[in-house]
Image (cartoon, rainbow, N blue to C red):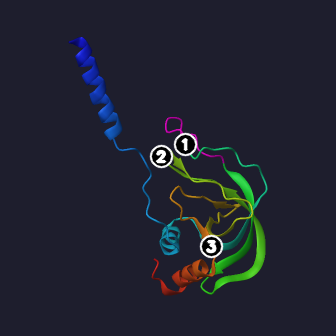
Amino acid sequence: MVRQFSVAAIAILSALTFAAPSQALSCLRPTPERSFAQFHDAPELYQVWSGRWIQTNPIPQIEGYVDPMSGTKPEPVLYRFRGRMVGPQGAFGPIRSFRVKVAPQCAGPWCAQYPSGGEEAVGFFERPPTGARTFEPLPCGGASFPRTIDTIDRIAACFTSGACN
């Protein structure tokens, strides 16, 4: 009797364990327009830049996971970014190179990754009153996009049409 009860209990627990939904981060696919609206509405000042990441420091090894108990997140790393600002007329002005503090953000246990050195991107950079610009990759994406004419044109249209606000 006890043996049958144990077998039945294990079978039920196994079924419940495998039937439970697995945890996953569910994200809307980011678009340049949605990201423009998000960063435009933020209380901080953001600038849009088109260019290339230059890795100047070692990147800490992360597994893309933050410990929910301790809150351990990826450490900020200084990079350089070389490119041009993006505005109503697209990419404009001289090519500039500047320091950027890259601080990947997390949503629960899911964390964004660091940019790859040499990666070309159009990104939203926080411009604090003093110090280096900050770039915060988001777990669902949207802080940067591949550097294409289409992406630059879509963001430029947000400046001129007001449709993205």
- Which is more N-terminal, label 2 or label 3? 3
- Residues under numbered marks 2 and 1 in contact, where contact means CB atoms less than 8 Å apart: yes
For mark 1, give the secondary structure: loop
Q: Which residues are magenta?
A: 65-75
Residue under label 1: 66
For mark 2, give the secondary structure: loop
Q: Is residue 110 left or right of residue 115?
A: left
Residue 28 lies in what quarter of the image?
Answer: bottom left
Residue at (47, 46) in percent of width and height? 108
Which quadrant would the N terminus be assigned to in this image? top left
Q: Which mark is residue 89?
A: none
Residue at (49, 35) in percent of width and height? 69
Residue under label 3: 48
Residue 45 is situated, as x and y percent measured from the top left of the image, at: 59, 68
**For the residues marked 3 and 1, what is the alpha-carbon distance in whole angstroms?**
28 Å
- Which is more N-terminal, label 1 or label 2? 1
